[in-house]
Amino acid sequence: MTTRIVYEQKLNGIYQEVVEMGRILIDSLKKVAIMIDTEDLSLMDPIKENEERLNKLELSLEDQFIVFIATEAPVAHDLRKIVSSIKIVSHLERMGDYALHIGKKYVKSNPKFLQLLRPRLIRMIHTLIQMLEGTLEAYTKNDVIKAEQTATLDDEIDTEHKKFLNDVFQQLSLPGNEKEFARALNLGRSIERLGDHITNICEWIVYAEQFRHVELNP
């Protein structure tokens, strides 16, 4: 086996762990959506476990990339993807925090208050899952066009978020809903921020492949 083949296998192995982070996050988002839909609060346990796995993977991957740079002297294109991957890993870990945060806020919320809001929350999360799946495909295939297309889905989340806010404000006039109002705003904002993080990941995919900084879906 040649040195170059060993080099590529080692690097691709690390990239696959980045993809695994994304898959763990997708699993968390699916569980959050199911929990909101069914009120099955027992799903918080695996969501917490996933968040812990993401924290550990972030630290491990950062170390692996640093060691690879130090020992393998990667060429320009590989170095760009490594640097981009370190940024992407950071975004994925932060998204895991948000997924857990959404779950915790939902657990504390009054299901009756969220009854009318629930369908829109679930739609936003399903769009996030679609975005993340497209992003992982773009990352694996170094596909700039796929990354750019995926980032446009953030518009759907922003549109749903605005409608969600309108729905929440309509319930503000009801007595005793002040705390629920604040929690609902926090839920919607956290979901909207997840879309921003995925868009940032798509921007790093473009940078890795084309060596240019872009602002997708401004």
Image (tube, rainbow, N blue to C red):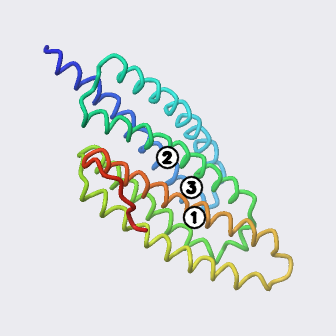
Q: Earlier in the sequence, mark 1 or mark 2?
A: 1
Amino acid on which the number 1 mark rests in the picture: Asp
x and y, in percent, of residue 83 in the image: 38, 37
Gap between marks 1 and 2, in whole Å? 26 Å
**Which residue is the site of mark 3?**
32
Amino acid at dot 3: Val
Toward the left, the furthest residue is 2
Q: Is residue 201 above or below residue 70?
A: below
Mark 3, mark 2: which one is toward the viewer? 2
Query: Quick one: 168 or 8, which is closer to the camera?
Result: 8
Given residues 11 and 217, the one toward you in this image is: 217
Disc number lying in front (1 or 2): 2
Q: CA distance from mark 1 to mark 3?
A: 9 Å
Q: Secondary structure at mark 2?
A: helix
Looking at the rendering, which quadrant does residue 49 occupy?
top right
| First in sequence: mark 3 vs mark 2 | 3
Q: Nearer the viewer, residue 46 or 51?
A: 51
Q: CA distance from mark 3 to mark 2?
A: 19 Å
Per the image, the residue denoted by label 1 is 37
Residue bearing mark 2: 91
Three-letter residue code for mark 2: His
Q: Quadrant of the N terminus?
A: top left
Residue 204 falls left or right of residue 184: left
Percent x, y for residue 209?
Answer: 25, 46
Residue 115: percent from left, percent from top = 66, 74
Q: Residues within 10 Å of mark 2 (few under 14, many from 20)?
A: some
Q: Please tell me whether residue 206 is drawn above or below residue 83 in the rendered image.
A: below
User: Residue 184's mark?
Assistant: none
Q: Quadrant of residue 155?
A: bottom left
Dot 1 falls on a residue whose secondary structure is: helix
The C terminus: image quadrant? bottom left
What secondary structure is marked by label 3?
helix
